[in-house]
Image (cartoon, rainbow, N blue to C red):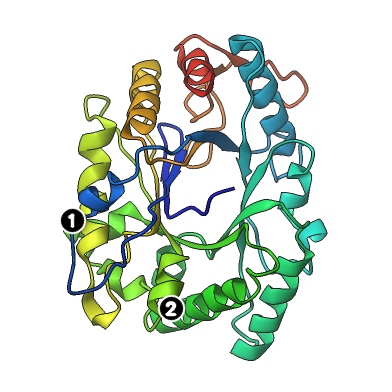
Amino acid sequence: MKTYSLFLTICVGFFTLASCKKGNEVTQKQNENVEQVANSNTNITTYFGASSAGFPDEPISGIDSWDRLNDRLKNKNGGTGLVFRRSFGSGMPEDFNSSNMADDVGRCTISVGELKPDFSKSDSENYDLIRDFVLSIPAGRIVYLVYRHEPESKVKKGGYSVAQYRDGLVNFIRAVISVQDQRPNVHPCFCLMSWTFNPKSGRNPDDYRPIGLTLNERRKTIAGVDGYCNDPTESASSKFNPIFTKMGTNSGGGTGNWGFTRFAVFETAAHGDRSGWVTDLGNWAKNRGNIELVSWFNSGVGQNAGPDGWYLGVWGNNQSTDHNWFNDADGSLNAFAQVIK
């Protein structure tokens, strides 16, 4: 399995994409346009997956919902299912078997999960706990570990400071990398909001960038962005390429270009022509040639968990006692099934 060097997440619902770039050393002096780097490798297979929120009276991890989605996709396209599941976490599990990712084994090849080390513990304590967790992952299992998904909202609410987050992130990255000789398919990630890259947010994305990493550490780190888009006329390329460029050229703080290696963008949209948007996004990801992972956010989070949610297709019944899961009135379920085929 090749190492990955670009991780992107997008949604109409939510999508996750990732890509790989090998070879050239990236230095602050070079500061090339990220598009030049991203397009330098056009032999990457695009893998598709999803996160999925639990329906009423189901496990909050959404594993049952994910299974149904996976089965429906396979029924639509003749048997091609999802390669990975994206899950979220509420803390620092003791080991892999205690995490939401444990449910993925036997279901999909790749896991994308989240860790939230405790700020009340010292860096050295968390370093050891993270290492132990990584070493508990079954050998050969491909895992992307996200450190504190979307930290900006927690910072805004006073849960922790930017400095605490950034220092914890660096500690997390180094802990994961320190055992990659034993778990080479486990990758450290972080994920911000795309709103943070909008000047109207009043934020500077560089504030959340890990500072002080070596070139090798930067190249092994996946930098991610979450966001939303409600305009069905805006193509994936016009939406995301400017973000890629900005991520790739924000090299302040003397740490070099941080978007050249791996980055993620989650994207949401609530519009009528979802099937067309899904098809366009899938084609763009495949044709770009350097997108590794694409994940649908199969959820009602942020909206009512019903017909207006981000579920593929339309949820036909909102009653926990009579799930009528998805029909395909808007064509999005079938569109995604054909994309992943």
330 or 2: which is nearer to us? 2
Q: Residue furthest right?
A: 97
Q: Amino acid at mark 1?
A: Asn
x%, y% of residue 168? 52, 80
Q: Looking at the rendering, which quadrant does residue 248 occupy?
A: bottom left
Residue 340 position (above or below residue 266): above
Residues at circles 2 and 1 in contact by the CB criterion of under 8 Å? no
x%, y% of residue 191? 44, 59
Q: Amino acid at mark 2?
A: Arg
Does 177 sit left or right of 281 as displayed? right
Q: Looking at the rendering, which quadrant does residue 89 occupy?
A: bottom right
For image coordinates 27% across by 74% down, the residue present is 256
x%, y% of residue 164? 47, 83
Q: Residue furthest front?
A: 23
Q: Secondary structure at mark 2?
A: helix
For image coordinates 22% across by 67% down, the residue present is 250
- Residue 166: which numbered mark, if any? 2
- Give the labeled residue for mark 1: 33
Q: Mark 2, residues whose alpha carbon is within 10 Å: few (<14), some, or many (≥20)?
A: some
For image coordinates 45% across by 74% down, the residue present is 217
Q: Is residue 297 visible?
A: no
- Looking at the rendered image, the disc whose residue lies closer to the viewer, 2 or 1, is 1
**Quarter that holds the C terminus:** top right
17 or 218: which is nearer to us? 218
Residue 246 position (above or below residue 242): below
Q: Secondary structure at mark 1?
A: loop
3 or 146: which is nearer to us? 3
